[in-house]
Image: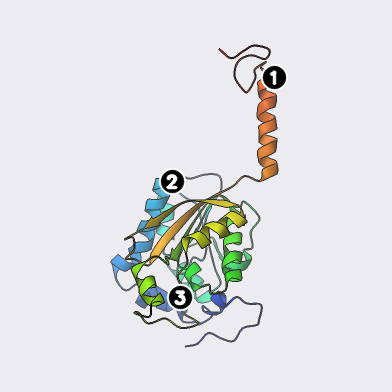
């Protein structure tokens, strides 16, 4: 069934999920085996462990959360869960599975304040964004509401499937299909949004299309300057020179 007609202000990625049966499809047929259903949660859990993500004062955002497949893993790690999705059907399935802390909304316009979440996880969205403006907007929103870390999956343009598709050896999905993204594009977009890409993770490099980008949010320039001034002031209070040694004395 085709998505319902939408106004010009709705991003194309949002329009895809207006089918009232999309949640049921994802909850049953899309992940029909336990192995496929657990693939994404296990990959995300491995990344969170590698980057020492632990329970903090701020919750974790799952955007978009779909039917809440990541929730059991995140809560098992002691992380407070908030999920957002544009699809009422997806959220309904997530609620039936026991999820709470759910919000209906678009990743393109996240209804949260800056720095609201310690970690923001975004799985299986970016490869649905065709226009560069949509991709940039989504990355900017993920970084904006994150306090520390963004973990996002994407289709790797360097994967075998993507290369074969670009050479015409594999059928393209069409204008509404999924698209592969170059890593340098993601680095540039995250940098412009105020985050530094610190790594890429693959389940099976060059073979699996899906990869994950991990980005640390940068401290604002004025905050870094303020922190530097406060650090120097503390050194001065103790009669110490940040370069080493007491003030007026050569470092030992």
Image side of residue 167 versus residue 226, left or right: left
Residue 97 is situated, as x and y percent measured from the top left of the image, at 42, 67
Q: Earlier in the sequence, mark 2 or mark 3?
A: 2
Callout 3: few (<14), some (14-19), or many (20+) C-alpha neighbours within 10 Å? some
Pointers 2 and 1 in contact (C-beta within 8 Å): no
Q: Residue at x 43, y 59 (%)?
A: 212
- Distance, label 2 to label 3, CA atoms, is 28 Å
The residue sitting at 61% across, 60% down in the picture is: 140
**Which residue carries the number 3 mark?**
178
Using a 10 Å C-alpha cutoff, classify the residue at mark 2 as few (fewer than 14 neighbours), some (14 to 19) or many (20 or more).
few
Q: Is residue 181 above or below residue 146?
A: below
**Residue sitting at x 61%, y 68%:** 108
Which type of secondary structure does the marked residue at label 2 adopt?
Answer: loop
Q: Secondary structure at mark 3?
A: loop
In the picture of the structure, the residue carrying the numbered disc 2 is: 51
Q: Residue at x 64, y 14 (%)?
A: 246
Indicate the quadrant where residue 30 lies.
Answer: bottom left
Q: Are discs 1 and 3 less than 8 Å apart at CB? A: no
Q: Earlier in the sequence, mark 2 or mark 1?
A: 2
- Regarding mark 1 in the picture, which secondary structure is present there? helix
> Mark 1 to mark 3: distance in Å?
58 Å
Q: For residue 174, which numbered disc appears in the image?
A: none
Q: Nearer the viewer, residue 70 or 185?
A: 185
Q: Is residue 104 visible?
A: no
Which marked residue is nearer to the observer: mark 1 or mark 3?
3
Q: Which residue is mark 1?
A: 237
- Earlier-in-chain disc, 1 versus 3: 3
């Amino acid at each position: 069934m085709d998505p319902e007609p939408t106004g010009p202000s709705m991003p194309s990625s949002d329009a895809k999920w207006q089918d009232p049966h999309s949640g049921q499809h994802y909850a049953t047929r899309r992940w029909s085996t336990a192995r496929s259903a657990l693939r994404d949660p296990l990959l995300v859990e491995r990344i969170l462990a590698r980057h020492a993500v632990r329970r903090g004062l701020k919750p974790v955002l799952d955007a978009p959360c779909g039917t809440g497949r990541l929730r059991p893993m995140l809560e098992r790690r002691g992380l407070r869960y908030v999920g957002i999705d544009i699809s009422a059907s997806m959220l309904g399935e997530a609620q039936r599975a026991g999820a709470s802390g759910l919000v209906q909304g678009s990743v393109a316009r996240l209804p949260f304040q800056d720095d609201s979440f310690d970690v923001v996880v975004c799985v299986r969205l970016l490869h649905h964004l065709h226009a560069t403006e949509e991709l940039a907007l989504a990355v900017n929103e993920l970084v904006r509401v994150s306090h520390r870390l963004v973990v996002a999956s994407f289709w790797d343009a360097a994967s075998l499937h993507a290369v074969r598709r670009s050479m015409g050896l594999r059928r393209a999905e069409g204008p509404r299909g999924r698209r592969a993204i170059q890593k340098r594009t993601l680095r540039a977009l995250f940098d412009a949004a105020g985050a530094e890409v610190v790594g890429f993770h693959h389940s099976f490099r060059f073979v699996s299309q899906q990869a994950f980008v991990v980005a640390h949010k940068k401290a604002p320039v004025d905050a870094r300057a303020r922190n530097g001034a406060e650090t120097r002031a503390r050194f001065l209070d103790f009669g110490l020179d940040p370069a080493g040694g007491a003030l007026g004395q050569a470092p030992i």
